[in-house]
Structure formats: structure tokens, C-alpha cells
Image (spheres, rainbow, N blue to C red):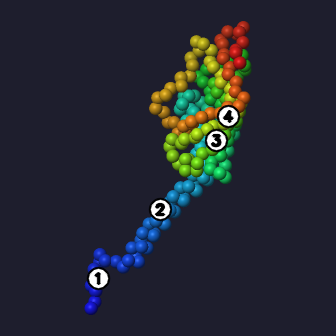
Amino acid sequence: MKRETTGAWRPRGSRLRLIGAGLLAVLTLVLGTLIFAIYHADSILQARIIETLSSRFQAPVELTGFHVSVAHGFQVSGRDLKIFGKNDTNIHQSGIQPLISVGEFRFTAGILNLLRTPMRVHRVYLRELELNIPPKGQDRTSISMQKRKIKIYVDEFLCEQARLVINTLKPDKLQYA
């Protein structure tokens, strides 16, 4: 007795091959995305940090040194971070002084965290933090909580060697530090 075959019936082995090929394609896509994220981690994270700070403070941001290591998750470090205001905050020093400057910073994050927006960082370590408070009466840069392009959220900052400078417009009166 012969079994009739129709176009809709397929042998069991070909279905398994089709499912296996689909799973292989998905796995290849996921691995490709992870490899791309790891390879471009420096530029992706640096852009996220600058964009988040610029958006948050509505001001120009400079970041001189930046490095990402992927040995044990993402280990990020940077140096000479400066966030400027609309005006020079300190008339007692030459050049335009930043509102906030950080000598060095570092934090760690999971590899998959890079692919999420917004990215969450639990703890950032800061060294040589300096906050320049603008003089009373000077237009202060507004730090608004309106919806902006915040790409990174930080839960906690730990700081070593912090300095707070309260500036004045009176040339005969020195700022508080």
C-alpha cells in the first residue's frame, strides 16, 4: 500500500533543518550586534556621555581622554572633562572657566547595558572635581529636568579631592574656595 503525498506534507527532517537554519540566523545576528558594540564601544560611549551632559546642562562639553576596556564588562575611564556655562564664572582667572571640571572619572557597566537606552550606571568614581558657582546676579546656566536626550543615568557618584568655588563679580573681593 502506497502512501499518497501532497504538497503540504513534508518529511520531519526538513522541518528541523528549517528551524535550525532560522535559529542559526538569529544567533548570527545577535553575535554580530554584540561584536559591533564591543568594537565601537569607545565611540558609542563617548558620544553618549557628551550628548547626555550637553543636554542636561545645555552647555558645551569637552572630554580630552577617553578609554574603554572590555576585559571584565565595560570598564570606562576618562580625563579632563569640562562642562562650560553661558558666561565665564570666574573673573579672577584668565580664560573661560568651566562650571564643572573633573580630572579623572571611571565606571563599569555590563556589556549588554551598552545596547540599552538609557544606559544605567550604578557608581561613577570622580577625582579632582571642581564646581564653579557663578556670581550672584549673573545669568546661571539652568539645569532643567525637562525631557531631554538623556542616554545615561547614574545612581551614585563617589568623589575624591573635590573643590567648590563660589565666585563674585566684585574685583576687590576674592571668591570662596
For residue 139, say whether it is visible.
yes
Q: Which residue is mark 4?
A: 126
Counting every numbered tag in the picture gives 4
Please determine whether, in this image, residue 127 is positioned above or below residue 21: above
| The image quarter in which residue 67 lies | top right
* Label 2 vs 1, first from the N-terminus: 1
* Label 1 vs 4, first from the N-terminus: 1
Q: Residues within 10 Å of mark 1 (few under 14, many from 20)?
A: few
Please determine whether, in this image, residue 88 is positioned above or below residue 26: above
Q: Select label 1 or label 3 by which is in front.
A: 3
Q: Which residue is mark 2?
A: 26
Residue type pointed to by label 1:
Thr
For the residue pair 42 and 118, the one nearer the viewer reads as 118
Please determine whether, in this image, residue 160 is positioned above or below residue 24: above
Residue type pointed to by label 3:
Phe
For residue 64, say whether it is visible.
no
